[in-house]
Amino acid sequence: MRCSFKHERALRKTGLEIIAGIDEAGRGPLAGPVVAAAVILPEKFRHKTLNDSKKLRGEQREEIYVELTARTDVCWAVSVVDREEIDRFNILRATHQAMRQAVIALTQTPHHVLIDGLPVRPFPYPHTAIVDGDAKSLSIAAASVIAKVTRDRIMVEMEALYPGYGFAKHKGYATELHLERLQTNGPCPIHRKSFLPVAQQLLALG
């Protein structure tokens, strides 16, 4: 299925005019925050390349991010939930919290929300969860790009604060390079202590 406004159009036919899309970035990494974005696109929005952020090159994501965030007819917001909250509550609850915070931060109140993945409860607005929604809904795809670029930029900043781990390259994911540097250097303050590879290193360090 091509990324489109199919789901948005179906909702608008029922009288729900303001539709937001929500997605997250950073559930899987061993380090750094989880980021959620909420986006409301104009009804006549068109775009040649917007798609699931995972299917786009880094340069494409950056270009689309700049375009979306500069448009006055696109309403968007992000929420960043840090490592401490992830370790305190677990990654699923932290992700849901980021999603709630992002949609509440929108300057427009959505009539309905399209969420990538599974339902989020509790949630402040009526919503529909769509598995692989970032490849099916343009609103969710826009949120996926904004969340991904926001998080990637944070991890590039973390490279400067915590050099030696390669955060600018792997963005905190469990790559071979990251696991090697984690073993060599031990965890740093942005490593998720509740994630197994990090917890194992903490145990090894005593």
Image (spheres, grey):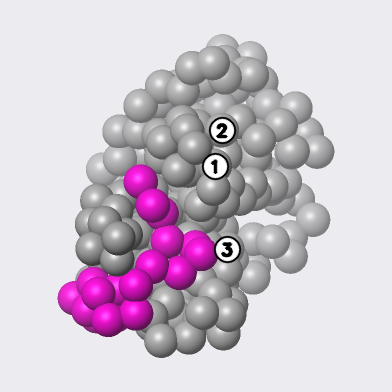
Q: Position of residue 88 (x, y in %)?
A: 49, 37
* Residue count near mark 2 (Cα–Cα under 10 Å), binned few <14, some 14–19, many ≥20: many
Q: Position of residue 111 (x, y in %)?
A: 66, 20
Image vertical order of residue 181 relative to residue 111, above or below? below
- Viewer-side label of 3, 2: 2
Circles 1 and 2, Cβ within 8 Å, touching? The answer is yes
Q: Nearer the viewer, residue 77 or 14?
A: 77
Q: Which residue is mark 2?
A: 97
40 relative position to 187: left or right = right
Q: Amino acid at mark 3?
A: Thr
183 relative position to 31: left or right = left
- Viewer-side label of 1, 2: 1
Q: Which residue is mark 1?
A: 85
Magenta-tinted stretch: 176-194
Q: Disc 3 to disc 1, how far (Cα)?
A: 18 Å
Residue 178 within the magenta-colored segment of the rendering: yes
Q: Nearer the viewer, residue 89 or 101?
A: 89
Circles 3 and 2, Cβ within 8 Å, touching? The answer is no
Q: Disc 1 to disc 2, how far (Cα)?
A: 10 Å
Image quadrant in which the C terminus is located: bottom left
Q: Residue furthest left?
A: 176
Q: Nearer the viewer, residue 111 or 44?
A: 111
- Viewer-side label of 3, 1: 1
Residue in the picture at 71% in, 31% down: 104
Q: Secondary structure at mark 2?
A: helix
Q: Which residue is mark 3?
A: 150
Q: Position of residue 176 (x, y in %)?
A: 19, 76
The part of the image, by quadrant, that contains residue 70 is bottom right
